[in-house]
Image: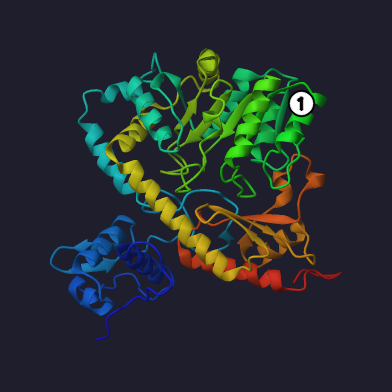
Amino acid sequence: MTIWRPSLAGRTGPKFRQISDAIGESVADGRLTAGTRLPPQRDLAYALGVSLNTVSRAYADATDRGFVQGEVGRGTYVRAGGPLSAQAQPDGLTRPAEGPIDFSLNLPAPGRAAAALARTLKALSGSPALASFLDYQAAPDQPHHAAAAADWLGQVGLEARGEDIVITAGAQHGIMVALLATMRPGDVLLTEALTYAPIKAIAHHLGLKVYAVAGDDGMLDPDALDLACGRVAAKAVYCLPTLHTPTTATMDVDRRSAIAAIARKRGLTLIEDDVFGFLPPERPPPLAQFAPERTIYVTSVSKSLAPGLRVGYLRVPPERADAVRTAVRLSSWMPPPLMAEIASRWIEDGTADELTAFQREEAAARQSMARSLIPDRYLSGNAHGFHIWLTLPPQWRADMFQMAARDHGVQVVAGGAFAIDRSDGPNAIRLCLSHESSRARVHQGLAAIAELLRAPGPNDSMIL
């Protein structure tokens, strides 16, 4: 009998992960059907020229991810129904395996969070403090939660103490809290001309005026920032210095230092959104390290660990701490204590490092795939980021390309969605590569995008 033997050509990352990915893709495309028995581990190790331990780890990883299940004495079998159907994924995420390929959502890749959660909940079930996680917290920023958060921020180069930390219900809540604490209706908020799309809606509901600052690469330009402060009485600046949304750019050290100097000169509060800061293995220090007394630093574990783990971390200047904590109480009373406890335990026991390493590996593999399919002249992206930015050829307008991609079964976001002034929207689109559950679907979607880039574009009567 011919045994199933995956091709590992072109795959990146540890060998065990390559084999596990191949199992998942073979389940997704029907080469491995429900109930199929995988080869004995020793046989597959021999066929692939790898160690038995590598195959054992691969089967364990595939089991954690829900592709297969083991039966004592009988072997390892493909799960009935398959994990890649439009049901809950093994990490607790719901990611369809059929229908449109979704490059519109900037969420982390499905990983191994569910297995980690099961272990943590089991440990928590025996905790004498279990009931406290269901009660109101007199001090929401528990010392051990804040200490774990400070350790987490240290990994991206930001010095922080537990007393500097405010915990929120995710980064978006953290942004809103920072704005509530520093601004009043009618105040002016400065942002990049292209920025995180919900900022406009948040600012509108808080009664803030938003003023876009020019920049030649999606990042804040220091001279333009200083000029804007001379034109409008701005109170704060919101920016994404690392893996900017949507352009993927990262601000260098000199620009960070210059912006910090302008913030001091003009009396600005800097609101730094660093939700993607964990992805690059090497990166400049956070903007908050250059102007700690003027910066509210915002991050969360939603991109690195699991999107449903709604825990955000703010590092705030001491003189802002009371106002920020008041804003937390006003907007949500407190972050969910149980979620904060889970995040803290994962940071303390190394689970967070493991889950983050997976996200880095998966992001790098998908970025490599994009570069193999899409010409460099269109593509901007960090080799370790979740998303890419495509500048379109002249035969395409962004809105028409978005419609054409939809007709080809791929969901994307046109650049205008990120523009403070939609009339200034660039002729570009953002593609998020991490949301889809399998690399096979990412490859399929990217191939469709590459084909559209080569197409002549819409004529007078139809979209190709």
Secondary structure beneath label 1: helix
Is the N terminus in the top left, top right, bottom left or bottom right quadrant?
A: bottom left
Query: As drawn, which residue projects farthest toward the front?
Result: 254
Q: Is residue 335 above or below residue 439?
A: above
Total tally of numbered discs in the picture: 1
Query: As drawn, which residue projects farthest toward the left?
Result: 73
- Residue 20 in sight here: yes
Structure colour scheme: rainbow
Q: Amino acid at mark 1?
A: Cys
- Residue 86 in sight here: no
- The location of residue 7, given as percent across then percent down, is 37, 76
Q: Is residue 460 above or below residue 186?
A: below
- Residue for point 25% across, 42% down: 119
- Residue for point 38% across, 60% down: 83
Query: As drawn, which residue projects farthest toward the right?
Result: 460
The quarter holding residue 341 reads top left
| Front position in the image: 15 or 19 | 15
Is the C terminus in the top left, top right, bottom left or bottom right quadrant?
A: bottom right
Q: Is residue 424 above or below residue 207?
A: below
- The location of residue 321, given as percent across then percent down, is 51, 16
Is 45 placed left or right of 356 in the picture? left
Is 281 placed left or right of 113 in the picture? right
Circle 1 packing at 10 Å, graded few (<14), some (14-19), many (20+), is many
The quarter holding residue 159 reads top left
- The location of residue 300, given as percent across then percent down, is 47, 36
| Front position in the image: 429 or 138 | 429
- The location of residue 198, given as percent across then percent down, is 64, 37
- Residue for point 27% across, 81% down: 3
| Residue holding disc 1 | 229
